[in-house]
Image (tube, rainbow, N blue to C red):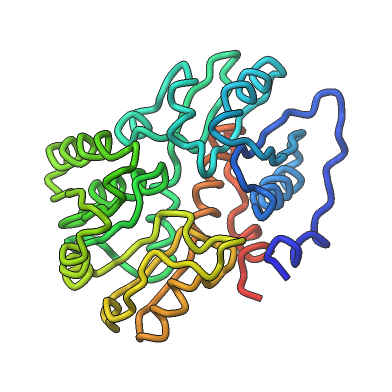
Amino acid sequence: MSLLQNRLEDFNMNNITGHTGLTALLGSPVAHSISPLMHNESFRLLGLDYVYLCFDVNEETLPAAVAGLKTCGIRGFNLTMPNKNKIVELLDELSPEAQLIGAVNTVLNDNGKLIGYNTDGYGFMQSVRDAGHDITGKNITVMGVGGASMAICAQSALDGAASVHIFARHTSRYWNRTQKFAENLSAKTGCQVCLFDNDDHTALRDSIAQSYLLINATSVGMVPDIDDTIIKDTSLFRPELVVADVVYEPQETRLLREAKAAGCQTFNGMYMLLHQGAKAFQIWTGQEMPVSVIKEKYFSVK
């Protein structure tokens, strides 16, 4: 049974009124998401007249969806895979961190002006600290060049990582953009940020061997493709390596399971989701999410 199914019995929708504000998640797939649970419970606890819904929207249908939601006066929405890059061209304004990252996971509708933010980097670094780790002065290997990856790379560099090595398919449509991103981030932070081809197995082996933290920032291993993994060669794992996966459904991906078997410390994307969501909640409502209550109710390991 999924994490979402385990929690559905705890969820009661707020009473919907003619004044209820709409917030949402746009992505594909989204049926597994626990974002509605955490946001709707927070609205209930704080007595806020909002509701949070999920809409299955991909890059092709995103422009029409955003236009419709804007017309309907949505207060704000989150973006998940695969929409964090595409959304940028549909917005009126970007926050400083979203400009640096080039991807958006949170949008605020400010009286008809859509402003994009990125809370993924903040959320991930909070999850690193929750897991008891510190990346200051450490080397990091990141798999993927999507919106979550760019946010994690930027926040890691800003928080003092010594180097960030990014791996992706050379055929990715984001390859050239990521090269420019890496150069810009290196210049601004002093962190060594480099981009490598996934097929450069020597570079990948060397990078992981020198890294404190390996991060899967792709959807590989997520439901329903739970038998897949971004790292096929388990000999790359060693006990001193920390392995993180932004995927949280399933809670333990094949990547984390095999890394743990090799003696690595591991953690998934659950607390990243919690903390990035708390930041988005504050952007929309001006209030702090009751994180400790939400963490205990929806993010404790069952």
The x and y percentages for residue 259 are 39, 78
Observer-nearest residue: 158 or 87? 87
Up-down relation of residue 99 to residue 128 (above or below):
above
The mark tally for this picture is: 0
Which of the image's four quarters has the N terminus? bottom right
Q: Residue at x 67, y 24 (%)?
A: 74
Report which quarter residue 79 is drawn in: top right
The x and y percentages for residue 8 are 79, 59
Which of the image's four quarters has the C terminus? bottom right
**Residue 112 as seen in the image, left or right of residue 7:** left
Observer-nearest residue: 134 or 172? 172
Report which quarter residue 241 is drawn in: bottom left
Up-down relation of residue 302 to residue 4 (above or below):
below
**Residue 160 as seen in the image, left or right of residue 95:** left
Up-down relation of residue 251 to residue 54 (above or below):
below
Q: Residue at x 76, y 40 (%)?
A: 47
Report which quarter residue 233 is drawn in: bottom left
Q: Residue at x 54, y 43 (%)?
A: 80
Q: Residue at x 44, y 22 (%)?
A: 89
The x and y percentages for residue 260 are 41, 81
The x and y percentages for residue 41 are 73, 50
